[in-house]
Image (cartoon, rainbow, N blue to C red):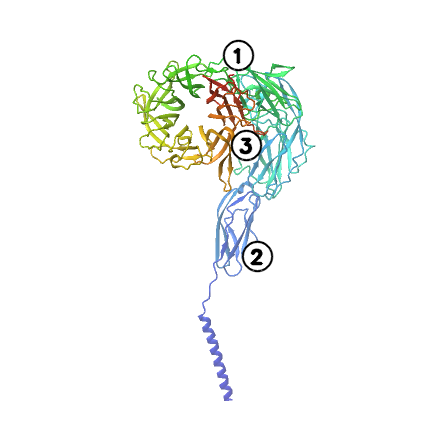
Amino acid sequence: MRADVSSFFTLAFRSLTIVLLGATLVACKTEKAPDQPTILGVPPSTAYLGVEYYYNFGAYGGEGILDYSLTNAPSWLALEDTSNKARQGVIMRGVPGLTGGNRGEADLGKVSDINLVTTDGSMSGVQPFDVEVKYNPLALETDTYVEGAVSETEEGYREHCSLPNLETTGSHTFTINEYAADGSVTGSKEVTADTHPVLVKIILDQPSVTRVAVAFELTSPYNPDSCDGEVSAPHQRCDYSDANAGDAIIGQDLVALGSNSSQLLEQLDYLTYEQDDSGYYSKGVVTLEPGITECYIRLEVVNDSFPEPSESALITLTEVRSGLAGLGESNSGVKASVIIDDNEPFVLLQTAKGGERDALNVGTAGEYVARLEGERDQEYSAKLVHSDGSTARLGTEFVTETYENNSWIENDILSFPVEVDEVRFRIRVDAAGYSNPALDDRFILLTLDERYQAGRENFARAPDDSVLRVNLNELVTPLVLNATEDFVATDLVVAHSGRVFVAGYDSANNDQVQVRIFNQKGLLLQNIDVSDPAAVLSSPKPTLSTQTREVTSGATKVDRYELAVAYSTDAEITGTISNGGQDVLVHRYWYDSAANGGEYVPDWSIRTGTSGDDVVKAIAQAGDSGYVLVAGETTGTWPEEHSAGGDDSFLQRIDATLDGASYVPALAWSRQVGSSSDDSVAGLSSSSLTPTLFGSARGAVNGASVIGGVDAYFYSTSTASTDISVRQVGTSGDEAVTDGLYDETGLWLVGNSAAEYRVQTLEDGDDELTQSATNTSAGFLLNYGLSGDIDRAITLNDPADQADDVLASVIVFDGDLVVGGSSDGDFTGSAVISGQRQGIAARVSLNESGDSGSDEVFLNEWRDQLEDPDSSIESLGNYRDDEITVLARKGASWEVLVLSPEGVILTP
């Protein structure tokens, strides 16, 4: 028994030990507290009327299942059932304007400090947020629509209504006025025309949970009582007045539904139409089903038969008739323009060759072409008129004629029978009674009379900016410069109201340098004796330059017209100091309107030079200060420069500062560049950013690499000290440069060589000038960038390659180049050959978008050749892009000739 008691106590002790040990271990372990309930996510800050607002919050923390509640929430916003035990979180949703009492627009506005609260019963978490309720805005998307054209609309990315069929035409009947020649109304006429449906998109920003019906209306500021001048309605100048220009007529140009279209076009279940007070369907209602955000308003463009400019109307969303949506973001309204382009056939007025510019002698008639383009099935007409800006008026300075019954009769209305798309007409300018007191020629800007044609059926329209310009030339015979004296002309410029400035010298009076100024009629306005008549010169070759610059006179800005003349002489001249050899003499004049009714008077003169011969080749003026640039050749050395040997090129700038009321000239700088041989200077350009001199040389100019025999070269500089980088260019042959110019395409060098030139693109992408030999000399035009990269190369050779063709002068004319020179053969391919050299001219188109055989691009290219033996074209001038003024030598006679833009000699 003792053993049993002992065993019992032993077992009890062990059990107690285990219990105590377990309790001790439990007491040593740290127990973790539950996380604070936390809501995850930030709901959208914007809600829209009629659009479901939804957000799914997440949550964590707490002990057990969390409960959720909203405080300070708008009535439309609520939480879904919060007893979901599958996950922590809650869904919040609502539809502003509908849920929570169907309050509509009363739910608009911002509610701040809304709280979503979650709790496990002992702990809680809060997520504050704000919500602003806005209108669900409607918007319109329109396009430009063309009469008679099938509109194309692509399905958008939005949920949208069914797209209507736009290929089916509708029909509309309306009434138009008929007019007499003076525009008065003679009656009315009912017209039925096809219509073509077009779509205007109506966009709802957010998908609505309810159907949205919105009303629309077509309107226009057009007012038939807004009349021009003193006429009163009804009248053509009221129906189509200046005030109504560009305004579409609702019910005539545009309708919502054509009067006869309901049985022709498909019925759309989302679109209904309504009539306006005039009985036209110009308004209606579009209904967007729930979830749809893009729908369509089908309108109809009336395919009428009137020539019209682009016109516009307004389409307006007027009210939301059902559902919750806003007329724009602020519900203040939605408007959009509906633009309609006309599709009537149009008429192009052109020269017989297809150009848009011509010149016509007073006392003659010229034949032109009207081309009708566009589809039609009826006879069309076009009425001619001079446009605004024309200084010659139809019926006063000129008349138009059409050919009828084998004779030309005065008529300003052209008729195009069906299948006849080209009609010839004439412009006739009678010398009898013609008057033009102005210095400039009159010019015609001929177009279609849109005022007359407006509202008249089957008249063609005029394309935008399509005008036939015809200059009326009054110099109809050659202007002989030395008919009674021994005047030798050397240079020509056209400027200042068409004045023709001709520089030269009087070989019978000590070779005195003169400038003669003529008007466009050939009348001598002024003869300027430039050099001292007592000074004995030796065949100087004066060159001239003109410029217009703006100066301050008192408190106003005025135009100052300036003329600069430069020549070389070794003669002693009173008031100047000779430097040895031939020096440079520069004279500047300015136009004084108070001097003898308006003449050029002396401004200043200066003599510069080296101990060698300094021969002027070109002069230019530039800059706001009117500085003068002189380029030439020298055998001496200019100050601070050095001679390379032989004839070097030089470029100098002369500034003139105002001293009281007079300008005082001073040599600003001279730069000298050359090779070891004789270098030739061909010209100077002040049109580039820095003055550019160009010429040709047989040798390395300023260390540049020699390419062939005679190379072309050019360089630019504008300071006295910066290094000059010479671009020596050409081929392995000879490129003798005679003239050049700088335009927007770069530097054009003109000269002559027995070669045909082309630009070849190498494998590395660079362009290279190449040439192949010709039998005889041909002219070239090479286009370079100022970095020396070749861009284009053009060769002018006689068709048979048998004549010696030489180019001497070049100008820019209406975006093209015109060159002049001489040939001892048939340069044009149809010239009468005299056996001696004859003057030649050619126009070269710079339009690279087509070629001479293209029907789409008119390239105004031509060649001319004077019939006179022993003749040449020495200089060219551009008169307003209307005429080419030519300084020509015919034997011992010096004459000014005029060419039209298409190469017709107007002074035969």
The tag on residue 431 is: 1
Measured in 3D between alpha carbons, the distance from the residue under mark 2 to the one under mark 3, in whole angstroms, is 74 Å
- Residue placed most toward the observer, 590 or 204: 590
Where is residue 486 shown, x and y percent of the image? 41, 15
Which is nearer the N-term, disc 3 or disc 1?
Answer: 1
For discs 1 and 2, the disc positioned in front in the rendered view = 1
Q: Alpha-carbon distance for marks 3 and 1?
A: 41 Å
Tell me what residue is drawn at x 64 percent, y 16 percent: 404
Left or right of 195? Residue 576 is left
Question: Between marks 1 and 2, how big is the CA–CA gap?
Answer: 104 Å
Mark 2 or mark 1, which is nearer the start of the sequence?
2
Residue identified by numbered label 3: 849
Q: Secondary structure at mark 1?
A: loop
Q: Position of residue 846 (x, y in %)?
A: 51, 30
Q: Nearer the viewer, mark 2 or mark 3?
A: 3
Please, what secondary structure does the residue beneath circle 3 have?
loop
The kind of residue on which mark 3 rests is Ser
Of residue 775 and residue 861, the one placed in the foreground of this image is 775
Disc 2 secondary structure class: loop
Which of marks 3 and 2 precedes in the sequence?
A: 2
Task: Please rate how many residues cluster around mark 2, counting C-alpha atoms within 10 Å: few if below 14, some from 14 to 19, many from 20.
Answer: few
Q: Report which residue position mark 2 lands on.
A: 84
Q: x, y percentage for residue 876?
A: 46, 22
Looking at the image, residue 506 sits to the left or right of residue 98; the answer is: left
Residue type pointed to by label 1: Ala
Residue 224 appears at what percent x and percent y? 58, 22
Numbered circle sitting on residue 69: none
